Image: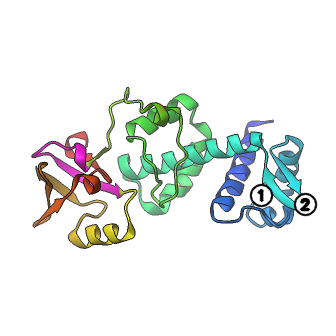
Amino acid sequence: MVEQEIQDVEEALGIIYNLREKGNNALESARDILQHGVSDKILKTLLEKNYVRIEKEHLELTPAGEEIAVSITRRHRLAERLLADILSVGSEKIDSSACLMEHFLSPEVTEAICTLLGHPRLCPHGAKIPPGPCCKKKTTTVPSLVNTLAEMSVGQKARVLYLAGLQHSDIHKLLSLGIIPGQEIVLHQNSPAFIVKAGETNIALDKEIASKIYVRPADTH
């Protein structure tokens, strides 16, 4: 396949993967995927390359197609995190920029970005980032620019990036207290509870909550 066709195939497999995540486990027919931006030509290629199959009129990913779909989804969502957390790209440009980047990230670069970001579990839109080999090994060779609040040192300043793995009630409570993405915080105490200052407010947090608040230390700007 030529380069453009490879990108189109990856894009199509990513679309199918995303639709399945949203609850469309079995697309009603091949026609359904055509309504989401996949051309007849690319659908034919997916079938010819055995990346998808039609079972009882349902379109499904084959193991080979699943592997590519997971890979492109991982690259796209890591690119989004990089653009949002490190490069501070505006939310309106994140998705389109990530769509361009995802096709050119080698496995080595993808792993390095993931490690740099501290192995994030969610993209900026809240979708799960498929884990890679570095996540399973908890690789830390590349210094991470993203840490949890629980990993901060007393007196250290940081900017809140995102909250992950919390109950909705905990998220609402934190947001109401001022722990929101973009907020500058200072850690005043880490035992027996974590005391952080957000704006003019001092907030007490237990370790479990602190370990799910992801921040970028101020000295990494």
Question: Could you tell which of marks 1 and 2 lies nearer the N-terminus?
Answer: 1
| Nearer to us in this view, 42 or 131 | 131
x, y percentage for residue 81? 44, 49
- Residue 38, label in figure: 1
Badge 1 marks a residue whose secondary structure is loop
Q: CA distance from mark 1 to mark 2?
A: 21 Å
Helix, strand or loop at label 2? It is loop
Occupied quadrant, residue 30? bottom right
Foreground residue, 85 or 177?
177
Q: Position of residue 215 (x, y in %)?
A: 28, 50
Residue at 38% in and 40% down: 118
- Name above or below for residue 63 compared with residue 176: above
Q: Could you tell me which residue is drawn at 62 percent across and 41 percent down? A: 71
Amino acid carrying mark 1 in the image: Val
Q: Is residue 8 left or right of residue 119?
A: right
Where is residue 157 shown, x and y percent of the image? 16, 49
From which residue to which does the magenta span run?
149-162
Please name the residue that numbered disc 2 is placed on.
56
At horizontal 82% and vertical 57% (from top left) the residue drawn is 59
